[in-house]
Amino acid sequence: MAGVAEGRRTQLLKGLPATSTVEENSASGVSVYNFTVTVSPLASEGVAILPTIVNSNPLTEAFDIESKGGLEFRVVTTGNPVLDYETMPKSFDLQIFVEDTAGRTDLSILTIQVKDKNEHPVFRGNMAIQTVTIYVLEGTPPGRIYRVDAADPENAKLKYSLHPATVPFSVRESGDIFSTKEFDYEKDPHCYFLNVTVTDPDGLNSTKTVNINIINTNDERPYFTTKQRIYRIPEEQSPGTIVANITAEDPDDEGSPSRLFYSIQSPDRHFSINPGTGVLQVTRRVDRDALPLRLHPNISLTVRVEDGPSSGRDTEMVITIIVEDVNDNPPECNPSAFRREVNENTTPGTVLLDLRNYCEDIDVDPSNNQFNFTGLSGFGSNNFALESTVSGRLVMTGTIDFENPANPGVEVYTLTVRVQDIAHPNYSNIIYIYIRIKPVNEFFPVFRNLSYVFSVSEITKVGSSIGRVHATDKDWPPSVITYSIVAGAGTRDYTNIFWISPMKGDVRILARLDYETTQKHIFTVQASDQEKSTTASVTVNVLEVNDEEPVCSPNFFSLQIPVNLAVGTNINGFRIECQDRDSDPRSFRYFINEGNENNHFIFSPSAGSNTSRLILASRFDYESGLDTKWIYNLHVHITDDNLVSARDKTTHLIKTGTVTLSIRVIPNPTTATTTTPGFTVVTRKENLYSGSAWYVPFVITLGSLLLLGLLGYLGLLLLTWLRTHCPPRINATEKKKPKKEVVVTMTKLNTVFDGEARDPVTGRIYEFNTRSGARRWKKSNEPLQPVLAMQAMPSATENSGQGMDRAEASSKKEPSEKRKELTAATKPAAKPSAGQSESPGQAGLRLQKKKEESEDGGLSSPAP
C-alpha cells in the first residue's frame, strides 16, 4: 500500500478495470477474464503478493484467480456456488489487489455480468424424484387419472405429449392425463407404461415415465379342491411338521395361479396355515399326555379361503386332527433326590424309603407307563438293599458304628437307583438317595486345663485378646464345641468385663481394667457340644501400669501481684497439692509449659514432692519494653517421672497433669506500704533413686543440714553488713521509703490478712490480703488480725480502681516528668558495689544459686 500512502497509485494491473460476462450454470474452471501484471524496475524478485480478490460486491466465492504462467493471470469460476441467472445477482464487482517486491501496490475492479441461458423444462412434485405409479380399477369410466406438474426456468409456455400414441390415454395442455376407455382386467393388459414429454418454445424438452396398473375386481367365490377331512398325527411332533396341504381355486383367475388367502378360524394354537400356500403345520408342542388332550385327543379346525385380504369372497370347511399317544415320558420321581437320617447302630432290616410312593409315568396309554427299580449302587451300598424291583423299598442290611475302629467314618452315604420304563425305548431316570448316619452323643467335652491363669496389663486396649481356652470331645465325628462365660465376668460397675469367642475360645476384654480398683478377676467358662457341657475356672491377674494422671488442687486459680514484688517471694502464698493413685508423692516434677514470658515464675520445689509453691523468679521491667503483658496465663504441667531413671524415660509410661493459673500484675500503688521482705529458697530436684543405695539419703541429709547452717550464718553476716553500709536512699520526686530490714529465713512469710468479705455463693466470711490478694476462710472464734498502720490498703476491687486513676493521672504529666517517675519506680536494682548492699531478692537468688551448685556436686536424694 506504499503507492497509496504517497498519494499516487502505480498501475501494476494491465487490462483492469474491465467488464466481462459469463453464462449461468458454468462449470468449475471456466475462464472469465485474462489480465497481466507489470512490476516496477525496482522489483527485482517480481510479485510479493499475487493478484488476489480481496472483496466482491455482492459477496461471493464463485470466482478465483489462477496463474497462466509468468505474469499472466485469469479469473475463473469455482462452481461453488454454481451461477444461476434466475436466483442470483446478475452482476458482481471483484476488487483485485497486487503488490510487487518493491512495495508498490495496485487495486482495480473487474465487473462480471451473468448471461441468461435457455434451460430444459423441469418436472415438479413426485415426478421430479421418482417414477409415478397410477392404479385404475377395471370398470372405471373414462376420465382424468393424473395431473403432470412441470415448469420452464424462463417461464415459457410448455407443450405436453404422450408416447406411444397407441395407448388408451391422452394428455391436455394443462398436463392432465385422461383415460379414453373402460378397462376389463380379464381382456386388457394389466399394466401400461407412458412416456410424458414436456417441450419449451425453443424445442428443449424433458421426459418422465408414468406406470398405470389396472386393478382386478373380485366377483367370484373361491372353492376347496382338497377332499380329505380327517388327519392322524403322533404326539410330540416338532414345530414345522406338515400335517396337510389345503388347496383351493378362484374362478376369477381363469386358469392363472390363484391369489388366495388361507386362515384358521377356530381358536387353536397348536397349528397354523400358510396364508399364501395353504400348508397346515405344527406350530407348538402337541402333548397327548397333558390336558386337554389327555381327555380329548381330537382337534377340530375351521379353515377359511378368501380371494382377498379383506372384503373379499370366502369359503370355509372343517377338518379333524387325531393326536395319537407314544411312549415319550420316562418314569419320574418327585423329589428326584431323597435325604434320610439314621442313628448309628440302627437294627438291620429297618425300612428306610419306599420309592413306589414317589414315582410315576404320565404316559396315557397303560402299555407305555409301566416301570421298575434296578441298579442300587454307591459307596457303602453293601449296608443297604432293594426289597424288590417292583416295590422299590430300601432297607438297612448292615450295622454302622462310628466308634468302631473298623468303621470308615463316613457320615453320608450317596446311593443311586435307576427307575426305568418297561416299554420301548425304555426311558429311565436316576434317583439319588443320601443316607446320613446320625452320631450319638456319648462323651462330655474336656478342657485341656482344669484352670487357666492370664496376666494382663491394666492399660490393655478394650477388645484385645488376653488368652484362649480349649476343649475336646471324644465323640466321632467330633462335635462342634461352643464356649461361653457362665459366672463371674462382671463387677459392680460393669455387667460384663470379659467376652469369649463362642467358636474359638478366645477371651477378650470388654471394659478397661483398673489395677487400683481390682487386681484379680475370676470367672467360669463353659464348653458345650449342644447336649453335654463342662466348666473350667479362669483367673485374670491385672498388672499395674502407670496409667493415672497426677490430679492437683487447685487446677485453676487467679492471682494478683504488685509490679514491684520482691524476687524470690512465694506469690500470695500459693501452692498446689497433687495426688496420683499409682505413683509415689516423690515422683512429681513441676514445670511451666506455656505463658511464662521472660521466665518470671518458677515452682519450688520443682521435683520430689507432692506440694510446690509459685515463686517470682525475676523482676518485671515494663519501662524498657522487655515486659508488655500485665496478665499471665500459665499452663503448668505436672509429670510423675521424677523417680524414673534418665535412660528409662524413653520407654517408661509417663502421665501428665495440668494446672492453669491466671496472674494479673498490678501497677505501683500511690502509697508505699511497710513490708517485711524475705526470700524463699527455690529448689529443683530430680531424683534418680536406687533402692540399693541406702547410704545416699543419709549422706544427702547430713550435707543438707550443714549447708543450711552455713546459709544461716552467711545470712546473718549479710544482714549486719547491709545495716552498716547501706543508708536509706532519698528520691526527690517520691516519698521517703521506710527502711527495710533484711531477715533471712528458710520458710515462707506469714501472710497478714488485713481485710475480710462475705462469699456471695456460700455466705461464709473469708479474709484476704489487700496487697497480694491471698484469701482464707475466717474461723468463727478468730478476730480480725490487727492491721499495720502502713499496710492498710483498699480492697482488691478498690485497689484496682485506684491503679486506674493513678495511671490516668500520670498520663497527664509532662513526658519528662513521667519518664523520671517510671525510671525511679521500675528500674531494677543494679549489682551492688563497694559500700552498697544487695536487695533481699538478690541475696536470696545468690544463696539459691550457691545451694544449687552445692547440690550439683553431691548425690541426688529422694524428696523429703
Image: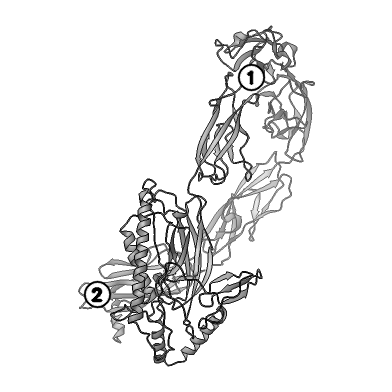
Is 639 placed above or below 223 here? below
Which corner quadrant of the image does residue 63 belong to?
bottom left
Q: Position of residue 539 (x, y in %)?
A: 55, 35
Q: Position of residue 292 (x, y in %)?
A: 78, 24
From the image, tell me which residue sits under label 1.
Answer: 441
Q: Name the quadrant of the C terminus.
A: bottom left
Is 673 placed above or below 782 here? below
Q: Amino acid at mark 2?
A: Thr
Q: Is residue 221 visible?
A: yes
Query: Foreground residue, 65 or 470?
Result: 470
From the image, tell me which residue sits under label 2.
Answer: 101
Q: Position of residue 406 (x, y in %)?
A: 55, 10
- 1 vs 2, front mark: 1
Please state if 199 lies on the left or on the right of 386 as rendered: left
Query: Foreground residue, 360 or 380?
Result: 380
Is 658 placed above or below 559 here? above
Q: Position of residue 2 (x, y in %)?
A: 28, 81
Q: Earlier in the sequence, mark 1 or mark 2?
A: 2
Q: Secondary structure at mark 1?
A: loop
Query: Foreground residue, 359 or 57?
Result: 359
Q: Secondary structure at mark 2?
A: loop
Which corner quadrant of the image does residue 318 belong to?
top right
Please state if 287 lies on the left or on the right of 399 as rendered: right
Q: Name the quadrant of the N terminus.
A: bottom left
Q: Residues within 10 Å of mark 2 (few under 14, many from 20)?
A: some
CA–CA distance between discs 1 and 2? 116 Å
Q: Amino acid at mark 1?
A: Asn
Q: CB atoms at circles 1 and 2 under 8 Å apart?
A: no
